[in-house]
Image: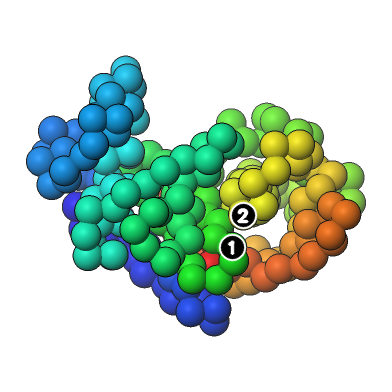
Amino acid sequence: MPQILRRDTKNNGFVVVWKIQESANMLLERLNLSKEDIDRVESYRLESRKQEFLAARCLIKEIIGQEPIIDYLQSGKPVIKNSDYKISISHTKGFVAVAFSKQLFAGVDIEYPSERVARVFKRFVSDEEELFIPENKRVEYYTMLWCLKESMYKMYDRKSSIFNVNFICHPFTLQKQGEIEATFDFEDRRKFSFDYITTDDFYLVYHC
C-alpha cells in the first residue's frame, strides 16, 4: 500500500494519498479494530468498499503512530478521539486520501474525472460559475468543482447546504496544480483558499 503523494500546506496541515493494492483481509491484519468497526466493515457488501474503509484506517494509523480511535458525527464526519488532528477522508477507484489539520478545518475530496459528474452538474454548479468554464473542458472543470464543493461540505458539516448556492467557487484557470478561492455563503460568510492537484488517475482538492 504505497504512499504516492504527500503535500504540506501553509496552515501546517498535510494531505496524503495512498494507492490501495491489498485485499480487505490483508488490510484488516494490520489493524486492531473494535467490534463496532468490524461490524461496520462486514456490513459492506462490496470488497472495494471494505478496502477503502480499511485503507483509510491503515493510513491514519501510520501517520499518528497508533491505532486510531475514530468516532462519527451524525452527519458521518470522522473524528479522531486519540489525536489532536482534525481529519477528512475521501477515496476513488483504488486510491484513498486523508487530510490532517491541527487548525479548525480539514476537508478533502479525490475523484476520477468522468462524464458521470458532468451529467449532474446543475446540482452543484451555479449559473455564475458556468461563465468561466471553457466549453471544451467541461468534464475537467465540473470534476474539479465537485471535488471543491465536497471538500467544503466536509469542512462545514452542515446538512442543509446547497452546493450551487452556499458554496461559491471564484473564477480560476485549471492547471496541473494550483489554488482555488471559494466562499461559504451562510450567515457567517467566509472565504478560504483550497489547493488542488490533477493527475491521470485522479483530481484532488484539499484544505487543511
Q: Are marks 2 and 1 in contact (CB under 8 Å)?
A: yes
Task: State the image coordinates of residue 98 (x, y, percent, origin top left).
Answer: 41, 56
The answer to whether residue 203 shows anywhere in this view is: no
Task: State the image coordinates of residue 123 (x, y, percent, origin top left).
Answer: 76, 34
The answer to whether residue 152 shows anywhere in this view is: yes
Give the secondary structure at mark 2: helix
The residue indicated by pointer 1 is 105
The CA distance from mark 2 to mark 1 is 6 Å
Q: Crowdedness of circle 2 by 10 Å Cα count: few (<14), some, many (20+)?
A: many
> In this rendering, is residue 114 above or below 6?
above
Give the secondary structure at mark 1: loop
Q: Residue at x 81, y 48 (%)?
A: 166
The residue indicated by pointer 2 is 155
Quick one: which residue is furthest to the front in this view?
Answer: 81
Name the one closer to the observer, 94 or 81: 81
Residue type of the residue flagged with mark 2: Met
39 left or right of 135 in image? left
Task: State the image coordinates of residue 10 (x, y, percent, origin top left).
Answer: 54, 81
Task: State the image coordinates of residue 199 (x, y, percent, origin top left).
Answer: 44, 58
> In this rendering, is residue 182 above or below 129?
below
Residue type of the residue flagged with mark 1: Phe
Q: Earlier in the sequence, mark 2 or mark 1?
A: 1
Name the one closer to the observer, 79 or 101: 79
The answer to which image quadrant residue 124 occupies is top right
18 left or right of 22 in image? right
Q: Residue at x 55, y 56 (%)?
A: 107
The answer to which image quadrant residue 33 occupies is top left
